[in-house]
Amino acid sequence: MTRRIDKRSTDESDQSPAPLFVTDSKGNILISNEFTALTIGIPLEELLRCNVQDLVKAGYYKESITMKAIQSKQKVTQYINTVRGFKLKSTALPILDSTDEVQLVVTSTNNYKGGLSIIAAPTLPHAYENSKRSVTSASVLKNNGIIAESLAMKQIIQVCDQIASYDSKVLILGESGTGKSVIAKYIHRQSAKWNGPFIPINSAAIPAALFEYELFGYVQGAMPGLMDEKQGLFEVARGGILFFDEVAELPLEIQAKLLDVLERGEFRRVGSTEAILIQCRMIFATNRDLWSMVKKGLFREDLYYRINVIPIHIPPLRSRRLDLVGLISSFIAHFNKVYDKKYVLPADEFQRMLAEPWHGNARELRNYIERLIVTDQTVLRQQQPVEQVTDWFTLDHFIQANRSQLSGLKEYTALTEGRYIQQMLQVCGGNSAEAARQLGIDRSAVYRKLKKMEDILAKLKV
């Protein structure tokens, strides 16, 4: 048993730096993840209701470095052995306010060997106290457009409320469409910089050759053809927030320059020797695995640790069914108002939407509901009862888009059969025998027809 445990935990070079907990000053867990739940051996939803001291008392591990960091107000690093046989080198980093009181503790596991200055807690200003801007979870839903019905999202909102008044760097992680920019804007609205600008940067959209000019600005004559000077985004964001979306797409040479600016806290316009102090907060976001990119040499490790002070991971929508219900209601109300409609979602359609995985997350859901309301499927069902068996809009679009690539009726039929079988499997909870029984075909035919559909889709490159 000991040998098996050691093999699983000793290769630190392949171990991804993962946040274990973000807790408040009393050790209550505000944010965690599936990785932590796995190492301890309890469901994530249950973990999010715990205090780290509860985990020690229950025997999940022997001592809490989070509590050590709270008591000492210092960074603590040591190995932790969990009851599930994981040996983790963990670091608890307390975030203090200007009165040296602990506000949050970020506990993570990683193999970073660098100096303390890379991830040392920043100097924080006094907490922003304004009763008019202090909101509860209920008012968040009403006033700020954040749907936070699930426990995971409520915890994220709670953390955002606590960190909003500080200038600590935040790294927001999550799949495309989960709402990373929404969370960044929420932090901005709740912060002392709420009346300052919120400047988003799509790191993937600016050509590498122009990135330095956009970030830092330039002086007159910095390069041929530049007759005027221009403020960079760091200056434009003064007094507000600079939001680096898709930060993983930054070219390596720009990463190096950004790191230098973050370490010095100042920058220079292109062509100038005058240093300008940074006077904005920075929030970063990505839908990619940054640590995997670090190991491949595609993202600088030192920059990774510089921006990953407070990590916030937004779970995908498919694991937040309570939020899905709230988003469906919110989007329908929004688009009914925009398009002056009175669309009512049928019960069967609602059930189907709850069963969908929504790989595009809230963005895909929003687009789907907008199309439902614009095409007014309820009216179509009432006026054209013969056509209510299917969504002709979608079928017609698919046929038009792929007519030149489909070799004949057999291929189109194979696609529709395969898709119908997939839906039946979903209804039957993945039980192929039950799906085959309801479809009236042999179980072997289920796999054969699915394989045929996959072959055609591969040809179409769908």
Image (cartoon, helix red, strand yellow):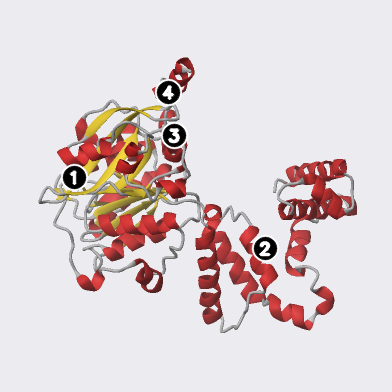
Residue at horizontal 25 percent and vertical 62 percent from the top: 191
Image check: 315 left or right of 217?
right
Mark 1: secondary structure: loop
Residue ID for mark 2: 352
Q: Nearer the viewer, mark 4 or mark 3?
A: 3
Q: Residues within 10 Å of mark 4 (few under 14, many from 20)?
A: some
- Mark positioned earlier in the residue sequence (1 or 4): 4
Measuring from the top left, give residue 137's x and y in whole percent.
36, 66
Q: Give the Cα distance between marks 3 and 2.
A: 34 Å
Residue ID for mark 4: 9
Residue at horizontal 80 percent and vertical 49 percent from the top: 434
Q: Residue furthest left?
A: 99
> Compared to 69, does 205 lie above or below?
below
Please give the label number shown on residue 122: 1
Mark 4: secondary structure: helix
- Mark positioned earlier in the residue sequence (2 or 4): 4
